[in-house]
Amino acid sequence: MTRVRAVLFDVFGTLVDWRTSIATALEKFGAERGIACDWYAFVDAWRAAYVPSMDRVRRREIPWRNLDALHAGSLDELIRRFSLPPPSPSDRAWIVRRWHELEPWPDVRSGLERLRTRAIVGTLSNGNVALQIDLARHAKLQFDVLFSSEHFHHYKPDPRTYLRAAAMLDLDPGRVMLAAAHNGDLRAAAAQGFRTAFIARPTEYGPAQTSDRFAEDEYDMIVPDVGELASRFGA
Amino acid sequence: MTRVRAVLFDVFGTLVDWRTSIATALEKFGAERGIACDWYAFVDAWRAAYVPSMDRVRRREIPWRNLDALHAGSLDELIRRFSLPPPSPSDRAWIVRRWHELEPWPDVRSGLERLRTRAIVGTLSNGNVALQIDLARHAKLQFDVLFSSEHFHHYKPDPRTYLRAAAMLDLDPGRVMLAAAHNGDLRAAAAQGFRTAFIARPTEYGPAQTSDRFAEDEYDMIVPDVGELASRFGA
């Protein structure tokens, strides 16, 4: 792997545990306001709305909007579906902002720190720039660079996201590795010539997770966590 | 200044001493190869070629190209002018890459670190993304986000560079501060509603510097260095 000069990480699920983080925050929010709800089901439904809402952008049915806007846009329907009282504008903004304050998996902070001694370490995420900044500051994760779909106005797995990130790194795609917990993301990156690392996050979607529990293709690396990835780079 | 949530720094001159860094590296390069040259004059001429070459991009006389490409493009003419022997391709690449490895002014590393406890700290530079990554890693400067003209395909002081950076921060321009050693950059940012901090770098262009020795306008802050800027933010 000496040829790999930059490792770009998928963020949601790969580096941070969005499900537990948001459900925990909303449980507290609900308890304070006397609102009963299965908040894990709520956050699962919110996350599930992500792909169709992105697809509408992708098919140009709606103009470009960033992930914060997609999260905000899917919230109202969700509130109706879960029969929750309509939140105040400031509560609503606070709820959408939960996606900015997510806890990292326990191996991430030290793993990235070690890996940075051997490679450029960045993100390649569908999260917008402001979201990623807040998230990295909150989780105390240090990156050399943030790449966002917002820079390219195309969402992963659009090939342009991988290729333009590599171009901005001034590197051939073969010198860039995508590290992700999702087979689809990795396949799309590999198709553009990226090196790939599968990081297993078998409980990202909760204990009953069925998809992405295992590496479904041959990747350059298959690792249990970021610490092991750093070790494979000799860190 | 409690309203300022993000401070974006100009890089060349404001954070790093490009002139001494490059001249010192080229002096060593020349000594090893027995090439005599006034390397300070050489780097001054190289920097002076920057504005006209950017302006050709701005006027759309040539398509977008990033700062590495502009530096490479102006090098050949410079080599002729200084009657230097044509460098090998690898020497040529090494010379252009000197812009990626610049020493920070002595107050910068600790000043940015302190300021980051109070605000989002980023760059807003005409340097391309790969250049900024290398530069930050070399100088051990830690940013929350890098903004580059390369993201926008417009060079500062084009108003779009300031406005699009603020938009990606999801902040009104009045909550973003540009910190720079150059009056022109600060005026352009202020015209778009940015807050402004002048950092004096009276020897950026050497001991005989005549321009940008002083703040020529009323800025929100006028400080001698990044440490004092951090102190003004209560850090």
Image: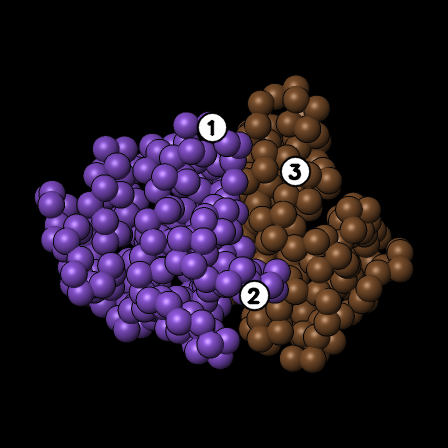
Chain colours: A purple, B brown
The residue tagged 3 is B155
Q: CA distance from mark 3 to mark 2?
A: 39 Å
The local secondary structure at tag 1 comes to loop
Between disc 3 and disc 2, the foreground one is 2
Q: Which mark is residue A61?
A: 1
Q: Give the amino acid type for the residue marked by disc 3 in the picture.
A: Tyr
Same chain for the residues under marks 3 and 2 in the image: no
Q: Give the amino acid type for the residue marked by disc 2 in the picture.
A: Asp
The local secondary structure at tag 2 comes to helix
Residue ranking furthest to the top: B61
Q: Position of residue A36 (x, y in %)?
A: 40, 71
Residue at 70% from the left image edge and 24% from the top image edge: B59
Which chain letter goes with mark 1? A
Q: Position of residue B225 (x, y in %)?
A: 71, 70
Q: Which mark is residue A91?
A: 2
Visible residue check, residue A230: no
Whether tag 3 and tag 1 are in contact, CB under 8 A, the answer is no
